Image (cartoon, rainbow, N blue to C red):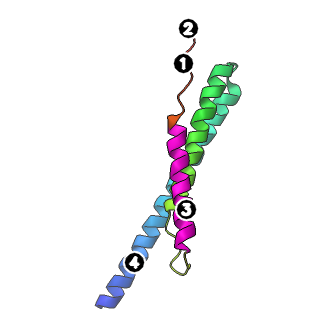
């Protein structure tokens, strides 16, 4: 196998692995959000619903941040300014949501 073919194969395998990892991460986030949402819907407690809403919002923030870090396809022209603004906004949202504390447990 020539060096060029070997390099092309390695690039193909890396992209395939990256795509699979991205797909699995998105599925895991979706599953976690669904479980939290279902738990909130089934709970009679407004305090539990409120706490789980914070968790769900935080998970959505992580999804958005994760998506902003995903590499676009090789053929895509990237507006670096827009990309960085979006990336910073995503991480700011994550940081802001981390500031929110869960309500204290009932006594």
Asked if the stretch drawn in magenta spans residue 100, the answer is no
Residue 107 is labelled as 2
Q: Do the residues labelled 2 and 3 touch (CB within 8 Å)?
A: no
The CA distance from mark 2 to mark 3 is: 43 Å
The mark nearer the N terminus, 2 or 3, is: 3
Residue at 63% x, 29% y is 39
Residue at 45% x, 65% y is 18
Q: Is residue 28 visible?
A: no
The mark nearer the N terminus, 4 or 2, is: 4
The mark nearer the N terminus, 3 or 1, is: 3
Q: Are marks 4 and 3 in contact (CB under 8 Å)?
A: no
**Which segment is the magenta one?**
79-98
Residue 86 is labelled as none
Residue 85 is labelled as 3
Q: Using a 10 Å C-alpha cutoff, classify the residue at mark 4 as few (fewer than 14 neighbours), some (14 to 19) or many (20 or more).
A: few
The CA distance from mark 4 to mark 2 is: 57 Å
Q: What element carries label 1?
A: loop
Residue 30 in the image, given as x and y percentages of width and height: 59, 47
| Predominant SS along the magenta part | helix
Q: Which of marks 2 and 3 is in front?
A: 3
The relative height of residue 89 versus residue 4 in the rendered view (above or below) is above
Residue at 40% x, 71% y is 14
The mark nearer the N terminus, 1 or 4, is: 4
Q: Nearer the viewer, residue 70 or 77?
A: 77
The relative height of residue 86 versus residue 100 in the rendered view (above or below) is below
């Amino acid at each position: 196998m020539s060096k060029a073919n070997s390099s092309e194969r390695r690039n193909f395998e890396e992209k395939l692995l990256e795509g699979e990892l991205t797909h699995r991460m998105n599925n895991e986030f979706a599953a976690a959000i669904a479980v939290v949402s279902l738990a909130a819907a089934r709970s009679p407690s407004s305090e539990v619903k409120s706490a789980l809403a914070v968790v769900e919002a935080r998970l959505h923030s992580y999804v958005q941040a994760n998506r902003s870090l995903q590499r676009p396809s090789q053929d895509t022209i990237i507006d670096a300014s827009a990309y960085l603004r979006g990336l910073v906004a995503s991480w700011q949202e994550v940081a802001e949501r981390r500031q929110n504390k869960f309500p204290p447990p009932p006594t």
